[in-house]
Image (spheres, rainbow, N blue to C red):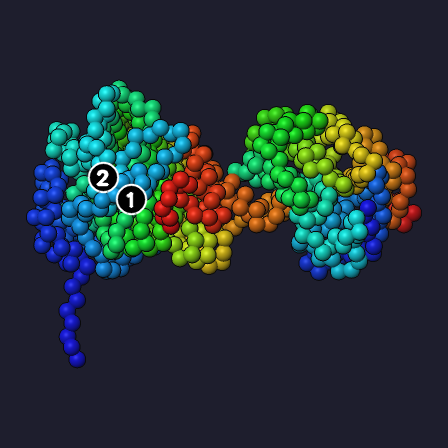
Amino acid sequence: MLTIKNLHASINGKEILKGINLEIKEGEVHAIMGPNGSGKSTLAAVLAGREIFEVTHGEILFNGKNLLDLSPEDRSREGLFLSFQYPIEIPGVSMVNFMKAAVNEQRKYRGVEPLSASDFLKMMREKKELVEIDSALTNRSVNEGFSGGEKKKNEIFQMAMLEPKLSILDETDSGLDIDALRIVANGVNKLKRPENASIVITHYQRLLDYIVPDFVHILYNGKIVKSAGKELALELEEKGYDWIKNGE
Amino acid sequence: MSKTTTISVKEELVDLYLSNLDLITDNSAPILNSERQAAIENFNLLGLPDVKNEKYKYSKIEPLFTQDFEKYFAPKNITFKVDDIFRCDIPEIGTELALILNGFYLPKGNKINKLDNGMIYGSLSEAAIKYPEIVSKHYNTVADNTGEGLVALNTAFVQDGIFIYVPKGVEIDRPLQIINLLMSDENLLVQYRNLIILEESSKASVVVCDHTLSAQKFLSNVVTEIVVKPNATLDFVKMQNEHNDCTQLSHVYIKQQKDSTVTTNTISLHGGFIRNNLNALLDDEGCENNSYGLYLTDRTQHIDNYSFIDHAKPHCISSELFKGILDDQATGAFNGRILVRKDAQQTQAFQANNNLLLTADAKMNTKPQLEIYADDVKCSHGATVGQLDMEAKFYMQTRGIGEKEAKLLLMFGFAHEVVKKISIDPLRDRIDDLVNKRLRGELSRCHNCPMHCC
């Protein structure tokens, strides 16, 4: 589904990603862990198409298409979803209008008729229940005045609405208490399909108790320095990152 | 070399007045005529505001008057059935409708109407004849004739306009809609006057829509006087939707008495050159004033909002929010003056002006101006001029929303903060819709109006 080959990316001339290779297949959950500043969020941003990062080398194939040629909106329409570490507040834009625009633009891209108002509201209702998000939140402006936990739940709600093929969860666990973490993780698990895949970016093993990965990768200094099964996360929890930093 | 003598615009206007005085007075009412002499003398002293006038720093007024405009001092006989040409019926609003064509009241039946509940509306000059005791008590008592040359000019020339009177204790459920139509086969200068009076404990909503129905140049210099008596409540919405060759100079004067509430929404959807002066005098305790404004400009349009909230007495609250989106080479200005007089203790006054510039060529000047002479007050102001939030745009794009649509949603969200303050439901939805269309570059005319206003 996703193939990253020798990806280099920099910001303001400073190289952050220094040759990433990664292969993700349908149905897989990949965890990417690593210390602060290792390039985890940069990788997520580059995948989503954030312009401030310049890709200097390498390629990314997403379902056979060259991802780097696509605008951020087309990446989304192709089925890529980024759950933001810090979701953006958009005052004045209601959740309903925001989601309606998003869902219908995706449908347009696929050549499907836009949803009728009643079908759309029905879909909103169903997905809200699925991710256990407070009904009142979706009557407000996008993320405006939401608590940290509410913002993260709202990311998962949007994911449920858009039904992406590949979702990237960028530190979805940061700032969540244990109950919110469970709700968010449940949402992600409920949305899991055999044909979909996820990348879970996290500092801590805690989230991986709930979202069980098939593979764990350690990103350090812009490179994936170690890949293994889910047991690697437990090892990290126990030993910290120093053994990685010190070159083992 | 030929020698030319230049006559100033001011002299020309005074001459115009003197040479047409008979025509002006014959087609008006004694109460309106009685104020003319003093007004033209004031105008002769004040002249048109020039750049030395700090209030008009960003809007040059005199050149606007140098173009060739026809002036009519009697209603021009345009035979036209309003229903055929204009139906601006905001759906479900069930509004009483009053029309002004080129500055003169355009009666559907009577020139003045009295409803069962006692509310009176119709032509100002007719009201001055039929209800002289009400009109003379209020007419020209709120507008500033000695400080504002354009107001003095209006008072000298005014012949008609809209009159609205809401008697004591009467609450009007359905908003009254005033539609100003400009339609002519020549360039035209119009100066009319609206007078709105809310007696004690009454309640009303008034919606004013300005439209142009022909492509000629128009210059409107309009004064609206509003008197809101104790415990009365007025919602006043002004919607400006005129074409690019139109100039509108609007002066709204509000006088609020004890415990009254006035909310104004000035929505400038479209227009070539707009100057809005909004003056509110909070003349007794317990007044609440909300002044909201939204302006959307593009190409070479110019919009200038001036507001003056005068906290003359203690225990009053005012809040002001003006927001604007400027595209292309559009220019704009905002000057919000708040005066808290010496004894106006416990005043609460808030003001914000936020602007979005969509291009590097668009320009906005904003100036909050708080003058506080009392010591126990709560006041705040803030002004911003910025661009669209690129982070928010990216966030939307990652959800599949195209860049253009994302920008539109952001602009719409920005504008909606003002629109949502409109308390009349169907009108708010309607204006939301018009704002949306305007931002999309579609004509923002009312959809079932067959005329292309802009």
Chain on which label 1 sits:
B
The answer to which image quadrant residue A191 occupies is top right
**How many numbered circles does the render carry?**
2
User: As drawn, is B395 to the left or to the right of B194?
Assistant: right
Circle 1 sits on which residue?
B181
- Is residue A221 visible in the rendered structure shown here? no
Asked if marks 1 and 2 fall on the same chain, the answer is yes
Instruction: Please state the horizontal and vertical placement of residue B427, each as a whole percent of the image.
Output: 40, 33
Q: Is mark 2 on a helix, strand or loop?
A: loop
Instruction: Please state the horizontal and vertical placement of residue A98, each as a whole percent of the image.
Output: 59, 38
How far apart are labels 1 and 2 at the CA level? 10 Å
1 or 2: tag closer to the N-terminus: 2
User: As drawn, is A57 to the left or to the right of B228?
Assistant: right
Say which of A150 and B83 sits in front: B83
Circle 2 sits on which residue?
B106
Say which of B10 and A24 sits in front: A24
Q: Please, is residue B416 above or below residue B5 in the view?
A: above
Q: Which residue corresponds to the image point at 70% horizontal and 28% vertical from the top-left?
A: A131
Residue contact at pointers 1 and 2, CB within 8 angstroms: yes
Type of the residue with mark 1: Leu
Instruction: Please state the horizontal and vertical placement of residue A248, each as a whole percent of the image.
Output: 92, 47
Q: Which residue corresponds to the image point at 37% horizontal and 44% vertical from the top-left?
A: B450
- Is residue B453 visible in the rendered structure shown here? yes
- Near mark 2 (Cα within 10 A), the count class, few <14, some 14-19 or many ≥20, is many
Image quadrant holding the N terminus of chain B, namely bottom left
Say which of B238 and A180 sits in front: B238
User: As drawn, is A64 to the left or to the right of A161?
Assistant: right
Q: Which residue sits furthest bottom?
A: B1
- Near mark 1 (Cα within 10 A), the count class, few <14, some 14-19 or many ≥20, is many
Q: Which residue sits furthest left?
A: B22
Type of the residue with mark 2: Leu
Instruction: Please state the horizontal and vertical placement of residue B351, each as a whole percent of the image.
Output: 40, 39
